Image (cartoon, rainbow, N blue to C red):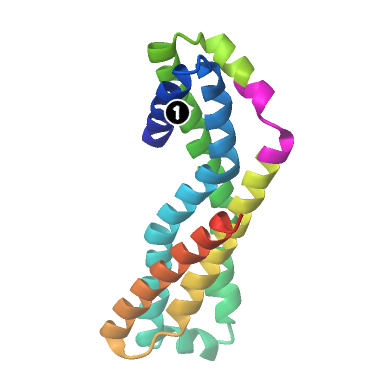
């Protein structure tokens, strides 16, 4: 929400100097739908959920619960990893969409308050600026980021060695790796 608000305000003031503040809705909508929505959501999920997954699985690994699950004939990948991966795979696009809508709504409020762009006109400009390609790109990135974050977190959690200190180290490593992985494809252009 606040990123959309700030982006609309800063770009709007700059564009107002040239009389083109009506470009603000399209700029914010495209930037968030294609890039910033999935990126910011990915960073937040990597930090919050990635850390939780790694810590939980790491604790299970250290306390030999994973070995106990294997001894019962249950595969840890199917029982511990797959549900987490599926959850992130489907959660990430949903949260990314919420982030996009919040940013566009905040931009709408700023555009109305500071640049006198009516709500209906704002959403017409957004509709005209956004292409289906932008939406698909953002959604595909979200799915990919969900898989990457989940995969990194689960891998680091299941490979923990060295007790509680190992869990802490693996959790930190998981978060840093996941955030760097999420940022890398976004900055590759």
> Whole-percent x and y of residue 35?
56, 45
Quadrant that contains the N terminus: top left
Q: Looking at the picture, does residue 61 appear above or below residue 189?
A: below
Q: Is residue 163 left or right of residue 66?
A: left
Q: Residue furthest left?
A: 165
Along the viewing direction, whichever of 28 and 86 lies nearer the viewer: 28
Q: Residue at x 59, y 87 (%)?
A: 73
In the rendering, at what x and y percent does residue 174 appear?
A: 42, 72
Vertical arrangement, residue 12 with respect to residue 119, above or below: below
Front residue of 102/17: it is 17
> What crowding class fits label 1: few (fewer than 14 Cα within 10 Å), some (14-19), or many (20 or more)?
some
133 drawn magenta: yes
Q: Is residue 97 magenta?
A: no
User: Against 17, is 43 above or below?
Assistant: below
Residue 138: image location, x then y, percent: 62, 45
Q: Secondary structure at mark 1?
A: helix
| Residue at image location 66% in from the left, 51% down from the top | 140
Can residue 173 be seen in the rendering of this structure?
yes
Q: Which residues are magenta?
A: 126-134
The answer, for residue 84, to whether it is visible in the render is: no
Is 137 left, or right, of 65 in this rendering? right
| Point 43% across, 68% down: residue | 53
> In which quadrant is the C terminus drawn?
bottom right
Name the residue carrying label 1.
11
On screen, 10 above or below 71? above
Q: Left or right of 25: which side holds 62?
A: left
Q: Position of residue 105 (x, y in %)?
A: 47, 24
Magenta: main secondary structure: helix
Q: Residue furthest right?
A: 132
């Amino acid at each position: 929400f606040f990123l959309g608000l700030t982006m609309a305000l800063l770009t709007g003031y700059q564009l107002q100097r040239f009389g083109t503040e009506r470009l603000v809705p399209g700029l914010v909508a495209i930037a968030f739908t294609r890039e910033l929505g999935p990126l910011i959501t990915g960073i937040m999920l990597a930090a919050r959920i990635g850390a939780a997954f790694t810590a939980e699985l790491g604790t299970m690994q250290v306390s030999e619960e994973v070995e106990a699950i294997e001894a019962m004939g249950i595969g840890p990948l199917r029982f511990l990893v797959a549900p987490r991966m599926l959850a992130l795979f489907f959660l990430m696009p949903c949260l990314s969409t919420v982030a996009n809508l919040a940013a566009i709504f905040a931009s709408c409020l700023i555009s109305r308050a500071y640049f006198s762009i009516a709500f209906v006109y704002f959403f017409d400009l957004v509709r005209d600026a956004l292409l289906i390609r932008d939406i698909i790109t953002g959604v595909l990135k979200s799915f990919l980021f969900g898989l990457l974050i989940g995969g990194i977190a689960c891998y680091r959690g299941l490979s923990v060695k060295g007790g509680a200190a190992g869990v802490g180290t693996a959790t930190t490593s998981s978060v840093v790796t996941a955030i760097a992985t999420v940022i890398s494809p976004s900055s590759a252009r």
